[in-house]
Image (spheres, coloured by chain):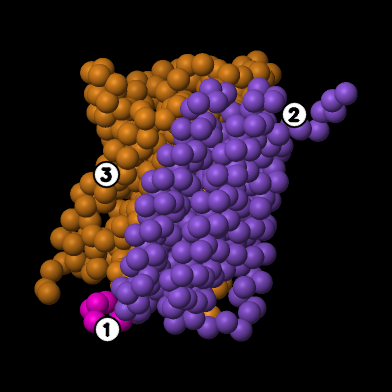
Amino acid sequence: MTGVELDPVEIQVLQDLTILVFAPFVSGAIAHLGARLQGRRGPRVLQPYYDIAKLFCKETLVPEEASWVFLAGPVVAFACYLTVPLLIPVLTQYPLPLGYMGDILGGGFILSLAGFAVALAALESGDPYAQLGSSRAMTFGALIQPSILFVTFTVALVTATDLPYFEAAAVRSSLGQAIAPAHLLAAVAFFLVVLSDTGRIPVETHASTLEFGMIDEARTFEHSGPALALLKWGAAMKQLILYVILINVFAAPWGEAGSRQVGAVLLAIPAFIGKALGVGVIFAVIDNSFSKLRLFKITEFMAVAFLLAVLAVLVLFLGAR
Amino acid sequence: MAALGTSPSTLTDAADVIALLVLLSEFAMLRSSLSRSQVRLYGFQSLCVSVLAGFVAATQHIGELYGLMGLSFVLKVIVVPMVILRLVREVRVDVTASHRLGVATMVLLAIVLSVFGVFVVGRLPVHSHSLPILALGLAAAVILVAFLLVIVRNDVVSQAIGFFSLENGVSVASLVLAAGLPLIVEVAFLFDLLVAVVVFGLLMRVHQGRSRTLSTRALDRLRG
């Protein structure tokens, strides 16, 4: 085992870069696959990169009444999305030094802060649709919180911590733990949370142009130029971050680097992207096989996620006896 | 259990997952708005109960339970859903959205009830060697949610399905507590179910014939 070892800090930077660089790729791949499933040719897989590059070259227009918050929102959100990958297991099985900086709730708070910044910027714009979008995003974001909390409780009951690295290690430790009912329930509940938070079909049509069904997408209406590029890039990163938590903590925490060897860490990148694309296929299939729920029926969807998360805690409570 | 070559905890987990599926299908019945899908869900739930019976038969080496499994499979997975589906088809009334409450509210209420059921059973000093005690808690939850289903849905099909799935909950509970129950008692349970199917079938026909609907809302209208 005499290879070049990477410094933990370098690995942590690499985690961030992985998310930063590959997020638009995963988004593009899902969009492409979704179009193919509908019998269209669809955009190129690399299209999101071209979009972002084009937007960075354009000028920024700001509504007359808007203040500095309008321009600061996207930057703050982007910074938040760059912070979260430091806390979660993207490439390694072992915790990195900054991984202890925050637990699952900490990561959740940072993601919420990002959502808050985008919502504030949307409010500043004065555009009714942007305001409608941010109002809805905040409402449904609050409604999905109980499910996230109960998933966190499950993790806490299983591992006696609420650090994502320990949950992943517990799942890896034995097959019995991976197919334990509580773990399955929590994983499915988190899957539903990801579905709702990434604006996928039962909750929101991802690429629609109909304002009345919009939640997340409507918030960016008034932004332009580099600010819009940051928002789009940030949305892709948020999606990939949630995939990381779903895959590397709950569903399939296998294939990450177990050592600090350069080869192992670099090999973990394609392994992770492969897993993310696998999840993306599932999301694209769901996108094409279900219809969007009416806005007032979304609470039913969230009730299901909550039910599964509560049952996970119940099972652990009674199963421990 | 060593004969099966798997660890006890994995077996317990498998039993727990099946019992959970029974509870989840009960929840699905509570929220699904179409009578047809409710009946199909009932069939699925009965299938889970049969599998659970087969599971106990295999792990505890109780031969009679295989008979019970086969009987309950034929009756509850095939015959009863077929009969009810046929009745619903004949009536030609689409029973939709008979909820008295919003779906999310109902699910939350049901969650509270199942938490209550599981916790109460958790306090009982019961020990079972056929199935994990969690299955008993989940069976209690199934029974309570079935009661809720009968109470908050006002159409005849829901009430029949609620009653039948109540029986499924009781079956699971009896598998946990008295797996070695004489076959004749279990068969008597199933016979009860058949009587209930006949009664509910009759009720559906008569109610539909009188009021041209399957909704029980018409029942509190006075005639004179």
Q: Give the Cα distance between marks 2 and 1.
A: 58 Å
Closer to us: A201 or A127: A201
Q: Which residue is drawn at 67% across and 64% down?
A: B116
Q: Which amino acid type is shown beneath numbered disc 2? A: Ala
Q: Regarding mark 2 in the picture, which secondary structure is present there? A: helix
User: Which residue is identified by label 3?
Assistant: A278
Classify B198 as above or below B181: above
Circles 1 and 3: CB atoms closer than 8 Å: no
For label 2, count other residues whose C-alpha is less than 10 Å away and answer few (under 14), some (14-19) or many (20+): some
User: Which residue is identified by label 1?
Assistant: B2
Q: In which quarter of the image is residue A38?
A: top left
Q: Residue at x 38, y 58 (%)?
A: B71
Q: Regarding mark 3 in the picture, which secondary structure is present there? A: helix
* Magenta stretch contains residue A5: no
Indicate left or right for A255 with B33 as reference: left
Q: Which amino acid type is shown beneath numbered disc 1? A: Ala
Classify B164 as above or below A69: below
Q: Give the Cα distance between marks 2 and 3.
A: 52 Å
User: In the image, which is nearer the foreground, mark 1 or mark 3?
Assistant: 1
Q: Position of residue A115 (x, y in %)?
A: 56, 39
Please give the chain letter of the residue carrying mark 1.
B
User: In the image, which is nearer the foreground, mark 2 or mark 1?
Assistant: 2
Q: Please provide the residue range marked out in magenta.
A: B1-6
User: Which residue is identified by label 2?
Assistant: B218
